[in-house]
Image: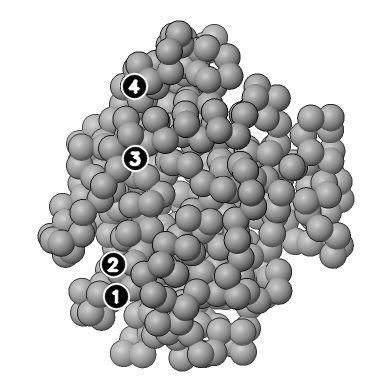
Amino acid sequence: MRVLVAGHRGYIGAVLVPYLGAAGHEVDGIDLGLYEGCDLGPAPRDPGTLPPCDIRDTTPAQLRGYDAVVCLAALSNDPLGDLNPAATYSINLDGTLRLARAAKEAGVQRFLFASSCSLYGAAGSAGVAEDAELFPVTPYGEAKVVAERELSLLADDSFSPAYLRNATAYGASPRLRLDIVVNNLTAVAMTTGQVRLESDGSPWRPLVHIEDISRVVLAALEAPRELVHDQAFNVGRQEDNVQVSHIADMVAAAVPGSTVTLADGAGPDLRNYRVDFAKLNDTFPDLKLRWQVRDGIDELAAAYTQHGLSYDDFTSARFVRLRRIRELLAAGLIDDLLRRRTQDTFADADASPGAKAR
């Protein structure tokens, strides 16, 4: 199968692309390249790729000949969405739909959209399934809700979208992120000795390792059309619905000498939800998600040690998406809607001492 991954140079894409290739698929990628140089260790290897491309500018000609498109490209979290909601809607909604319409016109039959469990937002502590009412509390979550709805309107006999509502991702990647909870708490424990909570630890979070996300993408690509056509799937494991305080305790147990602390004024977080993953299990009974959170914490700790992650790294723009975008804005390399201003490589951005992408 010929597969195009949009956003292949990001946190998940850097793991997904080689995973699909190892399964025997021919994989290409398109990416704007906002996070070039933001690597833990060697940069991820590129498959055969198109030139740097904004998904808001994709055309049918670029997508002809592919059997499937996987859309990972997006502003990736709630803080980025709050920085400029217009940019979030422009990329995560308008860009996704531009890519999907171009794919449909090009004759691409399957379109997998990386959605998010964050669209359940403030659902509370009862596990929510795919048919639950949605309560997004951020522009990021709202854009995912509308994108799913609009993609569904494109579904027909020749174009088959599916929506993978990923739980909060974690795990080591060549294109590391430290602005997601497991990765963040493990890094701060290793660089400061404190597992520092910014909330009171009470919110529930569903978690999933990025390699297991890749397993689900592969299963959805290879599944018979009728199993996945115009369907949403929560992606994760039942046992990995955990409270943030429990994550902190697991990190403290894995990082010798670290202790759990609360930030000044730490309180409840509106983003509080548990997720039901029964539909994924029922649809793909032979699919086994393999990563437990404790194992992922150990993997992260080993990767941080191997590559010498320092406190300066932890506090720089290198691994935090919001800081990276602010760095590119300050350098004048992108505009307010995160479109390129110049053709200079983003890896040359250096808005502040210690913040340079390496």
**Residue to which mark 4 is pinned:** 250
Q: Distance between the residues labelled 4 and 2?
A: 30 Å
Q: What residue do we see at 63% from left, 37% from top?
A: 320
Q: How far apart are marks 1 and 4 (CA)?
A: 35 Å
- Residue 129 location in percent, x, y? 21, 51
Q: Can residue 149 be seen in this view?
A: no
Mark 4 belongs to which amino acid? Met
Mark nearest the camera among 2 and 3 is 2
Q: Distance between the residues labelled 3 and 4?
A: 14 Å
Q: How far apart are marks 2 and 3 (CA)?
A: 19 Å
Dot 4 or dot 2, earlier in sequence? 2
Dot 1 or dot 4, earlier in sequence? 1
- Mark 1 secondary-structure assignment: helix
Q: Residues within 10 Å of mark 4 (few under 14, many from 20)?
A: some
Mark 3 belongs to which amino acid? Leu
Query: Relative to the observer, which residue lies in front, 17 or 83?
Result: 17
Q: Distance between the residues labelled 1 and 3?
A: 24 Å
Mark 3 near mark 4, Cβ–Cβ under 8 Å? no
Question: Residue 219 has which mark?
Answer: 2
Query: Relative to the observer, which residue lies in front, 82 or 311?
Result: 311
Against 39, residue 317 (above or below) is above
Q: What residue do we see at 47% from left, 31% from top?
A: 302
